[in-house]
Image (cartoon, helix red, strand yellow):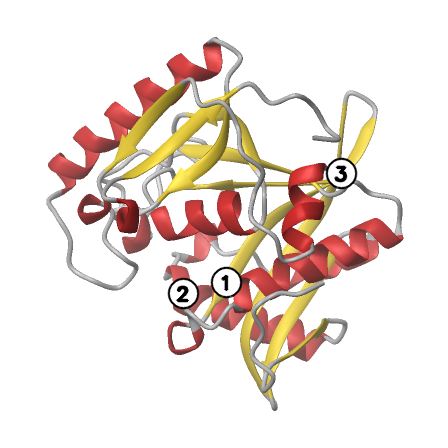
Amino acid sequence: MTHPADGSIDIRKIDSFDDMHACVDLQQSVWQFPDLDVVPRRMFVVARAVGGQIFGAWDGARLAGYALAIPGVREGRPYLHSHMLAVTPEYRNRGLGARLKWAQREEALSRGIELIEWTFDPLQTKNAYLNIQKLGAIVRRYTPDFYGPSASPVHGAGALPTDRMHAEWWLTSQRVETLAAGKPLPEYAIQDTVSVTESAAAPQGTAGPSPASTLELLLSVRRGLLGAFSKNLAVLRFEDERAGEARYLLGRWPGERD
């Protein structure tokens, strides 16, 4: 597989209690959760024990990022739910998030698991571009206020609902295999679009627009996506601001192998 890589960073499984504690510390620095919302080390231990995944990105002895997944079953199909992907700010934009995800895929396939899912904020356009364009996930589900109120400043310190899109990463699908080979996504017939204004989704740790204007945008995106999903459309592509407008592109998804 050919993927962007930073040769100075080592991606490997996390097994020790000390390394799990480092994940908790990184989690708190990235999301600034109150104690009530922090995923504790004990949960990392459980994930490891019951068939989940914990991968770390290491710069020497320093943890630069990690991915945590837990096992799930839906309609008789086993899958992994990738609950957390965190990269510390000074290591962002170096492809570490993608490398952690591809490591998750490789390990999942070694166990015969063909689906990984996760949720993401519909207004975080960098995440959307990674998930859809770089990894090949599709989206067919949207949950308003998925986590309930969050005191994290990343989530508006309780001012915004925690709406989430549900990424489905079909690991042996044509779109994912194509990206794994270093080729661009296949073309699809697009039947609907939902626009997202990049400036209204402030990057983590920066000042942004008012909560009221961000909420207005979020509700507009929510209405657009829920309406499209009710017509059995799926998010198949994402265009960021380099195309002139950040927007989700939706069409018919043929199936798990496509």
Q: Secondary structure at mark 2?
A: helix
Disc 1 target residue: 86
User: Are the two marked residues, 1 and 3, in contact with CB atoms closer than 8 angstroms?
Assistant: no
Quarter holding residue 67 = bottom right
User: Are the two marked residues, 1 and 2, in contact with CB atoms closer than 8 angstroms?
Assistant: yes
Q: Position of residue 147 (x, y in %)?
A: 45, 36
Q: Earlier in the sequence, mark 3 or mark 2?
A: 2
Q: Quadrant of the C terminus?
A: top right
User: Are the two marked residues, 3 and 2, in contact with CB atoms closer than 8 angstroms?
Assistant: no
Q: CA distance from mark 3 to mark 2?
A: 26 Å
**Residue 130 in sight:** yes
Q: Residue at x 28, y 51 (%)?
A: 242
Q: Quadrant of the N terminus?
A: bottom right
Instruction: Single out the residue that lies furthest toward the bottom.
Output: 60
Disc 2 target residue: 30
Quarter holding residue 76 = top right
Above or below, 44 relative to 14: above
Q: Secondary structure at mark 1?
A: strand
* Mark seen at residue 79: 3
Above or below, 76 relative to 22: above
Q: CA distance from mark 1 to mark 3?
A: 21 Å
